[in-house]
Image: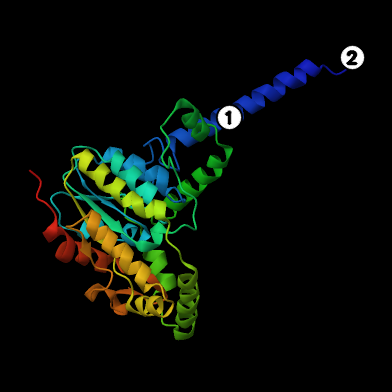
């Protein structure tokens, strides 16, 4: 009996490994669960906002663009009447650095940029991101192509599409809030009280990042340099949240931040404490996010009338 041939095993292993990598590359490219390559036709069913929104900006070069945090991401921009259809490039948990990075990715042919600001973006509790959207390189492309985890995400994508499940993101970039509404829009006073108590504790420990607050000047300079007309506004805060913020002693710092926004953007709209702060405008168990239809009304009636007209 001849001894085992190590080379044969190595060749076999090489073919198997190469075949698996080739399968991963084909699936990750053509199904494209992250929508990184712009090939995804089934919809985004995974947490891939940051990849998908950059692709969306490239695919919607003549749309008006909304940029903000998850508050703005939930706005159904199909209900917004702007100078052109809107693309919602907002990101859950968007940092000030990411907002500036998104502005830099807006096509110069866009007729309008709308930036929605939230004070909690400017905390020092999250690390600074000097380069939130690294330049696309062949190394990054290969990282997405030969991503074995992507096979699982591709299965999730195909399975969701076959079952008729709504994608996480709509074609216009808006977050589909159907499941969120089912989970967070129900009456539970005791749970809501606990949520507000937790948020009040957060406000007692909240501190601003001076570096990020100073980045408001960089945001202004980036918008001015980009040359696309823009309008900036501060998102509404839930009236009960405002009451808790006052009780936590954070209101002076919040007011200073609001004044700083208005200093750097004299034409900005401050809606933090406004008619839109009515708790009835927010999900009943999510006092952070207002309803998508409220956001659309806010843009249509309060923000866009103050936006510069495209030339």
Task: Name the side, left or right, on which 227 lies relative to 4.
Answer: left
Residue at disc 1, secondary structure: helix
Residue 310 percent location from the top left of the image: 10, 46
How packed is label 2: few (under 14 Cα within 10 Å), some, or many (20 or more)?
Answer: few
How many marks can you see? 2
Query: Residue 2 bears which disc, if any?
Result: 2
Q: Farthest residue to the right: give it.
A: 1
Report how far apart the C-alphas of labels 2 and 1 lie in the structure.
Answer: 32 Å
In what element is the residue under mark 2? loop
Q: Residue at x 35, y 43 (%)?
A: 101
Query: Visible in this render: residue 169?
Result: no
Foreground residue, 178 or 292? 292
- When the figure is inspected, residue 263 is found, relative to residue 141, above or below; the finding is below
- Tell me if residue 96 can be seen: yes
* Mark 1, other Cα within 10 Å: few <14 / some 14–19 / many ≥20: some
Q: Quarter of the image containing the C terminus?
A: top left
> Which residue: 50% across, 69% down?
205
Q: Quick one: 165 or 205, which is closer to the camera? A: 205
The residue at the point 34 percent across, 49 percent down is 215
Q: Nearer the viewer, residue 70 or 43?
A: 70
Q: Which label sits on residue 21? A: 1
Query: On the rendered structure, is 194 left or right of 294?
Result: right
Indicate the quadrant containing the N terminus: top left, top right, bottom left or bottom right.
Answer: top right
Residue at position x 16%, y 62% in the image: 300
């Amino acid at each position: 009996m001849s001894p085992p041939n190590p080379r044969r095993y190595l060749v076999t292993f090489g073919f198997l490994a190469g075949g698996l990598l080739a399968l991963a590359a084909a699936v990750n490219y053509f199904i494209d669960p992250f929508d990184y390559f712009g090939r995804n036709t089934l919809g985004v069913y995974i947490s891939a906002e940051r990849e998908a929104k950059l692709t969306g900006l490239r695919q919607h070069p003549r749309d008006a663009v909304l940029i903000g945090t998850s508050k703005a991401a939930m706005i159904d921009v199909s209900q917004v009447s702007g100078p052109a259809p809107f693309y919602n490039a907002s990101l859950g948990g968007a940092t000030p650095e990411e907002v500036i990075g998104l502005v830099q990715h807006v096509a110069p042919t866009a007729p309008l940029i709308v930036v929605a600001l939230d004070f909690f973006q400017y905390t020092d509790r999250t690390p600074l991101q000097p380069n939130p959207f690294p330049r696309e390189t062949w190394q990054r492309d290969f990282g997405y192509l030969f991503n074995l985890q992507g096979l699982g995400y591709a299965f999730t994508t195909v399975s969701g599409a076959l079952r008729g499940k709504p994608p996480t993101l709509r074609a216009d970039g808006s977050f589909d809030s159907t499941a969120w509404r089912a989970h967070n829009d129900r009456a539970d006073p005791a749970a809501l009280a606990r949520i507000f108590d937790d948020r009040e504790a957060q406000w007692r420990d909240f501190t601003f990042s001076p570096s990020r607050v100073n980045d408001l000047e960089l945001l202004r300079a980036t918008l001015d340099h980009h040359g696309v007309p823009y309008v900036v506004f501060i998102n509404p805060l839930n009236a009960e949240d405002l009451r808790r913020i006052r009780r936590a002693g954070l209101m002076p710092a919040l007011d200073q931040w609001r004044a700083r926004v208005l200093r750097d953007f004299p034409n900005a709209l401050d809606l933090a404490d406004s008619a839109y702060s009515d708790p009835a405008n927010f999900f009943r168990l999510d006092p952070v996010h207002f309803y998508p239809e409220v956001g659309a009304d806010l843009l249509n009636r309060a923000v866009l009338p103050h936006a510069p007209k495209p030339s």
